[in-house]
Amino acid sequence: MALLRFKDIEKMPQKDRDEKMKELRFELVKAGVSANKTNAKTKEIKRAISRLMTLNNSVKEALNKK
């Protein structure tokens, strides 16, 4: 899995971001992550999910202010 950088996420259309979010969540579940077990791959998946969520929330917030 390639690293997902914030600047790359910003360039994605909303539809692609939603698809990527679903894909990452499925991959996390597939990895069988428990609360006690983490490794570098699961850590990077979690970071990518949080980056996507952060951008989505900031976009929603900006739209609500208008």
Image (tube, helix red, strand yellow):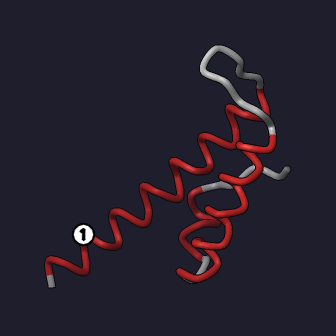
Rendered residue at 64%/55% (across/down) = 5
Rendered residue at 42%/55% (across/down) = 54
Say if 4 sits above or below 62 in the image: above
Q: Where's residue 7, x and y in %? A: 58, 63
Lateral position of residue 65 relative to residue 5, left or right: left
Res 32 quadrant in image: top right
Say if 15 sits above or below 35 in the image: below
Mark 1 surroundings: few (<14), some (14-19) or many (≥20) residues within 10 A: few
Q: Where's residue 33, x and y in %? A: 71, 30
Lateral position of residue 38 relative to residue 47, left or right: right
Q: Nearer the viewer, residue 62 or 42?
A: 42
Q: Residue furthest left?
A: 65
Mark 1 falls on what kind of element?
Answer: helix
Q: Where's residue 16, x and y in %? A: 64, 78
Q: Nearer the viewer, residue 33 or 15?
A: 33
Rendered residue at 64%/66% (across/down) = 8
- Amino acid identity at mark 1: Glu
Res 12 quadrant in image: bottom right
Q: Where's residue 3, x and y in %? A: 75, 50
What quarter of the picture does the C terminus occupy? bottom left
Rendered residue at 68%/32% (across/down) = 43
Q: How many marks can you see?
A: 1
Q: Residue furthest top?
A: 36
Q: Nearer the viewer, residue 66 or 16?
A: 16
In the picture of the structure, the residue carrying the numbered disc 1 is 61
Say if 41 sits above or below 3 in the image: above
